[in-house]
Amino acid sequence: MDRFLSHSLQPYTSVLLGYGFTSGCLLTVFFYGRWQFFCSVLFLLLVARYFKPFWLVLLGFIFAIFAVQVHYSLFYKQIDVKATDSQLVNVRGFVEKQLGRDYFQVQLTQISNHRIAKFRIVRANVSIPSPHHSSLIGTSFSASAKLKPYRSRSNFDNFNNELYAFTRHVQFKGRLSEVVLSEATSLGFTEVYRRWLWQRISHFKLGWLYYTLLSGDKSHISYEDKQTMQRLGLSHMLAISGLHVGIVYGLFFYSSKLLVFSVGFCFKVNKQQWDINGIHALTGLFGAGCYVLLSGFGVSALRAFTMLAVLVAAYVYAWRVANYRSLLFALCIVLFVDPFSLLNPGLYFSFIAVYAIFVIANSSTDSHLKSRGFVFKLLVLQLLLGVILAPLSSFYFYGVSLGAILTNLIFIPLLTFLMLPALLLVLVILWLNLDISWYHFFDLTVDWLLAQCINLFANSGWLETVPFTWPFLITFYLSMLLGVHFVLWRWLGAIPVLVGALSCALKPDIVWQIDVFDVGHGTSVLVSHHGQGVLYDLGAKYFNSFSLFERVVKPYLQKHQLRLSHVILSHSDQDHIGGLKELIDYSGYAPLEAFHNLDPHSHCNIKSITFNKLTIESLWPVQTMNSDNNNSCVLRITDGRFSVLLPGDIEHAAERALVEHYGEKLRSDILLVPHHGSKTSSSWALIQAVSPNIAILSRSFYSMWPLPHASVVERYNKQKIKLIDTATEGHIRVQISHSNLYLESARTLHPHWFL
């Protein structure tokens, strides 16, 4: 490899450009802030420590910024579409897949008079009128559309649908009308292959697993199966990676050897005139390339294939190649193909796992492990890999699989020597249109093994962890990097740890916390203190199945290991109690006892209770009024120094009565804006009585109502009250110490310049 680089470029230029490119991507795509900038610059300086001259590293860094901007402009930049209720746009495209009963993902080829370039992918999630639902997949269409830029709710420690949609090139959502279908289909080769494959293997018990292994597509894996594989530590089996690519390479390599041996044996061919081993290696590379092509060029698959190509080229041309440089070269290729793959967690798992294997292999060459048995080495390797990847698993999945060592000892050999070879044979037999009933026995055996592992490890083998911020993740891996590669200065590895410890020590001591979830048009507020929580409202429930409590609030409670002590329901509107069934399934009726006497449809009791060191007091309704909104439960929570007022959907009449009854007792630092900012609420009397420093508005970004009303915003502005909005800020969190309030929101804490 060094000889090749010295002849084609200046010595180590491509390595330097690769390092600079990587650090530049980290800076421009993912990191955005002082801490992030510091880490990127530190990484750049560490690279400069190894490679000279420094200007080449800097050149790579600048090239990275340029490459990211160009890539964004060509492939990801939002197309401007102006559509209102009265003005539609004409679109053309084809249907890719069905997301729900009347909801589809389509790829657009034309919007109004703007034809989308063939190299661009622009998708939209749209509803299509019911008469058109039969056999739509792959069908071209023209239609009128009301499109809006894709936007979703943004909550701390929750899956970021908006970011995922960005990586999938989903730019819009909306509705199609006046749909005209065409007989022509526009599916590419990969999609045609995947549809053909699923039709033929979906009847197997583990058809979803076989389909994923042969196509790289995870769309047929249920959420429950994904969770199960994650808890078993087998998620890597679902991503086409080095293991899968290596197996396919080996199969083609040895098949080539067998074929050449058979031909030579039968026909007495003189094989000395050819580089037979080179031919075998190239045949294996060709087979692996076909497999990666069918799998859709995922991040881990592309990394594995690039490294394999480098190693095969090094073998064929007798280059000297170092493991770390081949890994670096693969990383640069992946980032050059798509810099935004940095948003894919699979990239970090894939590259860190391979890097860890290299580190472990290099460090154990001369150790006593070399003389130990193969199984013992595998156990040690799996254990060390588990430790190294544990912070990454905790960061993304909020837990670590403890049973991964044993499950991988079972399934990795099974995948290597039986499952994947058998599936490739099945693929050939299916292509020849022959019978594959013989595979049912194998299917039942693998299903039985997986069921036994689930019974043993799915629950007891999963260690849940509390969410933490990314600087802790960077600290761990930066310390490991410094400790491994700076042999004489290993003490440098302690610097990130000391910086991280100092940062934690300087953080204020948070006593209690208020979380206003981003639940769209609705309300859900959690007040937590010492591992216990008080929940005010549950958010909405859509189509009698999509519960915001189940999708947003419940996962947050579980990830932060909070016990739900009390639940207060303001009133019976569906945007406030939509997740009632899911709440009862999760915690039973016990949290409703104090304020609702176990009856969730009753007005709240007027009472005051002590919750740890907080006082929770319900203030309203002291009298029943003729409006459900005006009978909302008004709650005030205080620690004696700071307080929050949660008024539900009360309107002017209830606000006047509340002010008359309590007066200055309503004074609070934080106010949840009544009735989502409607003009029927937030009267002068209430705002002046509460006199908050912060007013929080809970509403939907795309709303059919004009919320917040201009007159309401004007009243808060005139009082110089800081007004923040879940529609624009996402999940809003207020952390309260003994002496101060600390405000943060999901969209501003984790900003992405490209969204």
Image (tube, grey):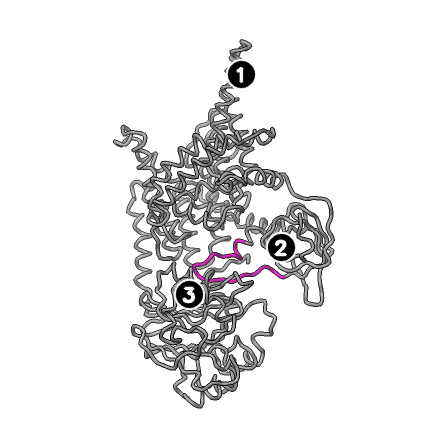
> Which structural element holds mark 2?
strand
- Residue 501 in the figure: left or right of residue 303: left
Q: Is residue 11 visible?
A: no
Q: Would you name the residue on which mark 1 appears?
A: 274
The one of 401 and 489 positioned closer to us in this rendering: 401
**Circle 2 or circle 1, nearest the eye:** 2
Specify the label residue 584 is tagged with.
3
Residue type indicated by callout 2: Ala
Q: Give the number of callouts.
A: 3
Q: Residue furthest top?
A: 268
> Which structural element holds mark 1?
loop
Quarter of the figure with the C terminus: bottom right
Residue 133 at what x, y percent from top left? 66, 52
Q: Would you name the residue on which mark 2 appears?
A: 124
Task: Reply yes or no: does residue 154 show up in magenta.
Answer: yes
Residue 116 at what x, y percent from top left? 68, 50
Classify residue 502 by image quadrant.
Answer: bottom left
Residue shown at the point (38%, 68%) measured from the top left:
589
Give the residues in magenta. Answer: 148-164
Residue type indicated by callout 3: Ile
